[in-house]
Image (tube, helix red, strand yellow):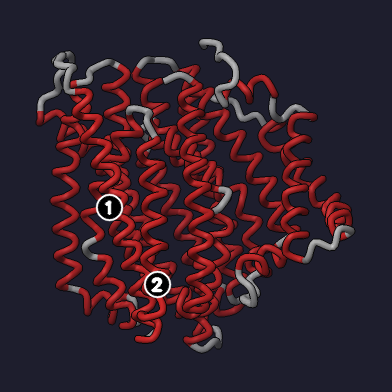
Amino acid sequence: MSRKSFISSAIILMIAGLVVKIFGFIYRIYLSNLIGAEGMGLFQLIAPVYSLVILTLTSGISIAVSKMVAEEYARSNFVNLKRITKYALLVVLTAGIAVSAVMYFKMDFITAVIIKDTRTYYAFMFLIPCIPVIAAASVLKGYFYGIQDVAPTALSMITEQIVRIGLVMLTAAYFLKLGLQYACALATAGMAVGEMSNLCVLYVIYKIKKKKDSKNTSKKGFLQKRKIFGDLLKISLPVSSNRFITSIMSAVENIMIPRMLVAGGLSYHHSIELYGKLTGMAMPLLFFPALVTSSLATTLVPAISEAISLKNFRSANYRISKSIQITFILGFVFMAVFMIYPNQISDIVYKKENIGRILYLLSFTCIFLYLQQILIGTLNGLGKQGISLRNSILGYAIRIAFVFFFIPVYGIEGYVWGIIISLACVSILNLVTVTKMTGMVIDCRNWILKPGIIGVVMLIISKYINSFFSIFRLGSSLSAIMSICGNIVIAACLMFIIGVLDKDETLRMMGFKKIRKI
């Protein structure tokens, strides 16, 4: 894969991600106004179990398919592409059906003992049929990532979001009358139907592509069934084990948060509200810019795998280095944005919920949050899932300690500082591992110093930008939006002026200029 196709694939995913995020924000604003902070907290209680099941099933197999397909595609062994996908589908569908059956028969235990809130019962029931569907979709996504064709995934993401929002908006009034638990169940049902539409789109495109490629009858590099199954398990099991362990720790962390807030003196009602504000409202805002880094991380796995399989190590280092640089730039810029405008952003998106203070504290996580996504993608591409697991366990251990010891004393702010410290530790450890593995040099000047200076400049000039737009009397919301956009535009210009970004190189990466071969 050329540099152009690597960046182009990431850009396509970013555009699709932007569309999905915009729809998602509209949906989340609608949902939060519909069910309130307590309802969002109740809905977020489902997330730990959802993540535990789905990420364990899908993350490893998706990366395995992406990595194996990319390697076989680079060697022109086209006969293996569909075989890898077929056997991976067999594995995840079997596992998904088995997990769904176990959850169905243990539903009372999950809601009453683990979650300790039986109002989540119906939401979980809607989640069960989702599991095999999401697992199958992850395999098809891995196939398309492996052949560097991200357009089907982008289309399926948008379709999923439209279907989800449409279903919830059409039936919300009826379910809300039945009670809060039924409204939360509706949100889960929308997610389930959306995932089914996602799979349908991917499968139709996959069948069309399979029919077009059937003319290629070459048996070059034919892999035996045993070899394919062995490689799938060899790659996916460490990643899935990583996800399982980290998801267990994440579930413990998230389930403990409301309980520790209660231990600190809050009522259960208020603790669920505060938990909903943190995880259901403030955190999604922070993850909005992460669509860039998540897209880069997704395309990095097959890109690195392909470059290494062709022994093009310089190309692999270039891709990693550029992704890390972009991540630091985003981190500093959006850390400054969330530090400057926490209350304005809160009022625009979630009126009367007062999450500005939480958003301000979370702004300090931006750099490490985005960097961690890129570094985990890089380690997966390098086949170092064990090291990634070790570092992730350390991070979760730090956060759980903060939940247990600091939340009862300092409230939710104590937990936010735990997030910052854990993300910083994990990111530093992962970065050290990547540099040792690749021999890549840390460019402190262009990664940290220059973007950091621009972040400081944004903090200094923000009041002048705010004063400028206040002259036009646009209203508080529109004035805040224009000020935020003005800050980001000025930051982008400064990036080129002081040499953080090179104009010609940026145009080449985006496909507007011919790329020189390495």
**Real-space CA distance between mark 1 and mark 2, rounded to the nearest whole angstrom:** 20 Å
Residue 164 lies, in percent from the top left, at 38, 61
**Helix, strand or loop for disc 1:** helix
Nearer the observer, 54 or 488 = 488
* Residue beneath the point at 69% across and 24% down: 502
Front in this rendered view, residue 173 or 368? 173
- Most extreme residue toward the front, as rendered? 170
Q: Quadrant of the N terminus?
A: top left
In the image, residue 5 above or below residue 261: above
Relative vertical location of residue 402 with respect to residue 62 in this rendering, above or below = below
Residue 183 sits in quarter:
bottom left
**Is residue 259 something that shows in the picture?**
yes
Q: Which residue is mark 2?
A: 45
- Count every numbered label the image shows and give the total: 2
Instruction: Give neighbour class at mark 2: few <14, some 14-19, many 20+ (Cα, 10 Å).
Output: many
In the picture, measured across the screen, residue 441 lies left or right of residue 136, that is right
Q: For this rendering, which residue is in front, 274 or 81?
A: 81
Instruction: Provide the residue designation for mark 1.
Output: 134
The structure residue drawn at horizontal position 18% and vertical position 42%, both measured from the top left corner, is 89
Instruction: Check disc 2 and report its element: helix, strand or loop.
Output: helix
Amino acid, disc 2 = Leu
Q: Relative to residue 224, is residue 479 depicted above or below?
A: below
Kindly identify the amino acid type of the residue bearing the numbered disc 1: Ile
Is residue 280 left or right of 192 when viewed as pictured? right
Q: What percent of the width, then of the height, locates residue 286?
A: 58, 56
